Image: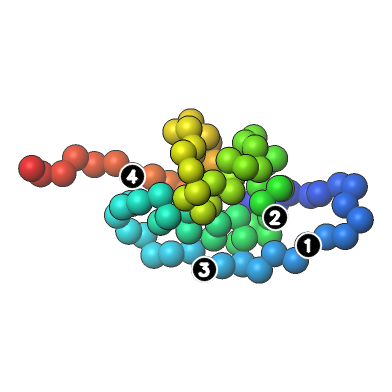
Amino acid sequence: MIFIHGEGHAMSKTVIPLPVPEPQQLLDAAMLGKFVRARRTQAGMTIHEAAAFCGVAVGTMSKLETAGGDVKLSSILTACSMLGITINLEARER
């Protein structure tokens, strides 16, 4: 479980936890985004808190969650690691 405490916020936002999708083959950026958003919301973090926790820009976190643009692989791997998302790789038969 991931905990982060925000300081200096006049009002705290309620984050509604989304269900984590079933494990599946990664076919596109939108599928990865669903996992990232679900893990973030399960942890009760706003997108701003998650970006700070993962050490990436808010825009990067937004792009990752919405598949809204190119994100550096190093940022994807860092965010996934920090949010407890495992990406498995295996060779397919040709």
Three-letter code, disc 1: Lys
Q: Which mark is residue 19?
A: 3
Mark 3 closeness class: few <14, some 14–19, many ≥20 residues within 10 Å: few
Front disc: 2 or 3: 2
Image quadrant containing the C terminus: top left
Residue drawn at x 50%, y 49% is 68
At numbered mark 1, what does the secondary structure look like: helix, strand or loop? loop
User: How far apart, in angstroms, are the residues tagged by discs 4 and 2?
Assistant: 27 Å
The location of residue 1, given as percent across then percent down, is: 61, 54
Three-letter code, disc 4: Asn
Q: Which mark is residue 46?
A: 2
Instruction: Give the quarter of the image for residue 88.
Output: top left
Front disc: 4 or 2: 2
Instruction: Give the residue pinned by disc 1.
Output: 13
User: How far apart, in angstroms, are the residues tagged by discs 2 and 3?
Assistant: 16 Å
Q: Is residue 11 left or right of residue 13?
A: right
Residue drawn at x 60%, y 61% is 42
